Amino acid sequence: MKFHSAVRAVVSAARPHLERFNGARLQLSRRLRDSLQNLQKKFGAWRERSKNSARTASERARRRKRRLAGAVGCAACVLLPSVVFGAMSYRRNLAMARESFPATPVLSTHDRVLVLSPHCDDETLGVGGTIAEARSRGLAVRVAFMTNGDGSRSTQIAENVRHLRRDSLRQIAAMRQHETVAALKELGVSREEIVFLGYPDGGTQTMWQKNWTADAPYRSPFTGADHSPYANSQTPGAPYCGQAALHDVTRLLGEFRPTVVFTTHPDDTHPDHRAAYAYARSALETLRLRRDSAGWARRARLLTFLVHRGVWPAPHGYHPDAPLAPPADLKDAGTRWMQAPLDERSRRAKEAALSRYVSQMAFTPHYLRGFLRRNELFGALSADEARETGPASNGAAPTAFNLSAAQKKPLSQQRMPHESARSF
Ligand SMILES: [Zn+2]
């Protein structure tokens, strides 16, 4: 009995402890369960976020791909016709090069040759061999440059001018003049026979169209100048306006009195090249109207050459024995084309002259060497030839017989010759 009583006493004494133990155990297990559930929730949320984020990233990647495909498609739509058109033009130009044109010498023994070149190197590309031939025959030659090439970013980059400062472009003008003098020396032309007019590269067409007078001059975006900053210009400090440029070209022609003037064709695609024709043509017209210069000015021939015309010359690159033929699209466009043959000596001189344009050869050597051919190509515009043939059959004065209404306007109101070339 005593034993049973003792056991009951022990059990009743231990019960509170056992109950506390059980309570603690239950509490612990609940906490563990809650923690586990929390962890599970957090893990689930993390997985969900990861999935969403992966979905967003892949969506972004897909959108990027779609945008890229769109851009490529648009570029293809824009470029493809150009590429196809370019390829077709090139094929047509190649076919032109296979056609035979009569070789036409353009100089006679008493010619006085004046070249009006838009930039430093155009004269060598277009007329270099003919200049060399003229000098070897003892003909008087004058080569004038509308601009000093002071807008040539490619030259600036090629020369590693690191800071795109305006001054550096003026330094490039000096460098290009230096190259020009060296190139023309190869052709037999001395420094005294070279004239720099100093007008802004890339601005001569705008001067003609929008900045005609000195009170609203053109400002070069390259040099920041609105007048010639070059001390060796024919007219130092000349304002950048069409009137001043025409005055300079007229003075140049009037003083030298050439019998043949070479300049760039009005259908050349470079605006400065089209403008050079406009100034040369207008200067000749001005002189033909003056009593003291009308005689020689009426007889002076105006011959043009091309430098920029799409995928031309064809074939592309250095083909010294291939002919230089006109672009197919200008074959019957109011220009009588002449292929002037070059002798071996003139061809070598032209190649040597071109090599002196180091800054330009560094950038587009294949294109430039494409002008080293067995001939040079000159175009006489039908309208110019009509002006140069003298009085019309009805006896009307040659200075008035085909002046169009456009020509009678002040020059500042005239359109560019390429816009009204056939009425010029
Ligand atoms: Zn040029």
Image (spheres, rainbow, N blue to C red):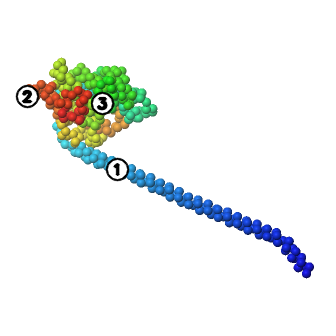
Which type of secondary structure does the marked residue at label 2 adopt?
Answer: loop
Q: Residues within 10 Å of mark 1 (few under 14, many from 20)?
A: few
Query: Which residue corresponds to mark 2?
Result: 394
- x, y (%) of residue 211? 31, 28
Which type of secondary structure does the marked residue at label 1 adopt?
Answer: helix
Which label sits on residue 338? Answer: none
Describe residue 269's horizontal placement relative to residue 172 as left or right. Answer: left
The quadrant in which the N terminus is found is bottom right
**Rendering quarter of residue 389:** top left
| Amino acid bearing label 1 | Ala
Compared to residue 411, the image places residue 86 above or below, namely below
Query: Which residue corresponds to mark 1?
Result: 76
Which type of secondary structure does the marked residue at label 3 adopt?
Answer: loop
Can residue 137 be seen?
Answer: no
Q: Are marks 1 and 3 in contact (CB under 8 Å)?
A: no
- x, y (%) of residue 11? 84, 74
Whole-number angstrom distance, CA of label 3 to CA of label 2: 38 Å
Q: Are marks 1 and 2 in contact (CB under 8 Å)?
A: no
Q: Is mark 2 within 8 Å of ligand 1?
A: no
Residues 179 and 117: in front is: 117
| Amino acid bearing label 3 | Lys
**Rendering quarter of residue 172:** top left
Most distant residue in the bottom direction: 1
Precedes in sequence: disc 3 or disc 2: 3
Query: Which residue corresponds to mark 3?
Result: 210
Can residue 27 be seen?
Answer: yes
The quadrant in which the C terminus is found is top left
- x, y (%) of residue 106? 19, 30
- x, y (%) of residue 260? 20, 27
Q: Quadrant of ligand 1?
A: top left
